[in-house]
Amino acid sequence: MHPMARIVFLGTPEFAVPSLKILIARQDIVGVVTQPDRPAGRGRQLQSPPVKIVAQSAGIPVYQPESLRSVEAAAPVLDWRPDLIVVAAFGQILRAHVLFMPEHGCLNVHASLLPRWRGASPIQHAILAGDKETGVSLMQMDEGLDTGPVFVQDSISIRREETAATLHDRLADLGADMLARHLESILDGHLQAQPQVDAASTYAPMIKKEQGTIDWALPADKVDRCIRAMTPWPSAFTTWQGKLLKVLAAEPVEQANLPAGHAGDVVPYQDTAVVLTSSGGIKLLKVQLSGKRAADTSVFLQGQQHFIGSRLPN
């Protein structure tokens, strides 16, 4: 084993935090690169990326460039003399002068079973597509988008009620666990990276806010997948009486248990409401009307008697 390989870590959001923490505990992390602080929340206060907070609390130097595109911008990373760069959800495309800077190159923790779901939003796309399983790939980065050879993969099944939030957390922990188990073998050369089969690749572009719009004319299982994939961001939404209505939690209901009607019709069901789709329905469990607090649907219905019997737009 390289007793103390000098590692620089590149990452930004919560997904990268478990990987960084495991590396801090086991390796010599000489520096962390993360995105600049950004305004967030209602007050638009500057917020530090989660990775920066963890690095600073461990006393590790942090560098926050707008981009590493230029050789000059990457100079502080070169000054750290890394043997390996580990990347997890960094949020920037890396150029050759960074990718090939360390002896061992750049190792990426990617939240899919490559070559399926290359790109920025693999977790949401796996749920949207109805995949039965997904996982994490530890891969050697090259100049393409998640196209480099893969050292190792671990898979987990996607649960029926899985949201992008719950799957994100499970995959973040899995990625950290894989680093703990395999990093020494990768550095020692005992694990050889295998090229991806490009013909089998699928692409997971960044999720846009408008993808949260619910189309009630789709079958219930597809609407259900949309709702779960868009939780927590941008959240799935529809409109009612001209106001945005977020669907924060829901579950599909079989057609046999429902009255006839049009897609988008809101019908009473047990102590809550179901919205009919082209096949089956969606039982609303938790909703949030614009300007109001999130509420269980049974509570929401007490204040909005006209909701049942209305029709939501397709």
Image: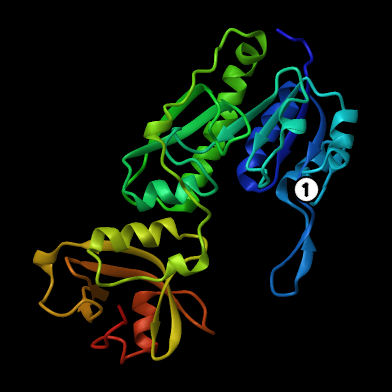
Locate residue 90, reporting x and y percent: 67, 43
Decide if residue 231 is on the left or right side of residue 104: left
Locate residue 23, reporting x and y percent: 70, 27
Decide if residue 149 is on the left or right side of residue 75: left
- The residue lying toward the viewer, choosing from 298 and 259, is 259
Task: Name the residue located 25 percent from the left edge and 58 percent from the top edge.
Answer: 221
- The residue lying toward the viewer, choosing from 303 and 250, is 250
Above/below status of 49 relative to 259: above
Q: In which quarter of the image is the C terminus?
A: bottom left
Locate residue 271, reporting x and y percent: 26, 75
Q: How crowded is mark 1: few (under 14 residues within 10 Å), some or many (20 or more)?
A: some
Above/below status of 268 relative to 28: below
Decide if residue 186 is on the left or right side of residue 242: right
- The residue lying toward the viewer, choosing from 223 and 93, is 93
- The residue lying toward the viewer, choosing from 66 and 287, is 66
Above/below status of 257 relative to 289: above
Q: In which quarter of the image is the N terminus?
A: top right
Q: Can residue 271 be seen from the camera position used here?
A: no
Locate residue 206, reporting x and y percent: 53, 54
Tell me the element at label 1: loop
Mark 1 highlights which residue?
67
Task: Name the residue located 69 percent from the left edge and 69 percent from the top edge.
Answer: 41
Query: Which image quarter: residue 22?
Result: top right
Q: Which amino acid does label 1 sit on?
A: Ser
Counting every numbered tag in the picture gives 1
Task: Name the residue located 79 percent from the left edge and 37 percent from the top edge.
Answer: 32
Q: Can residue 263 be seen from the camera position used here?
A: yes
- Colouring method of the image: rainbow
Query: Which image quarter: residue 251?
Result: bottom left
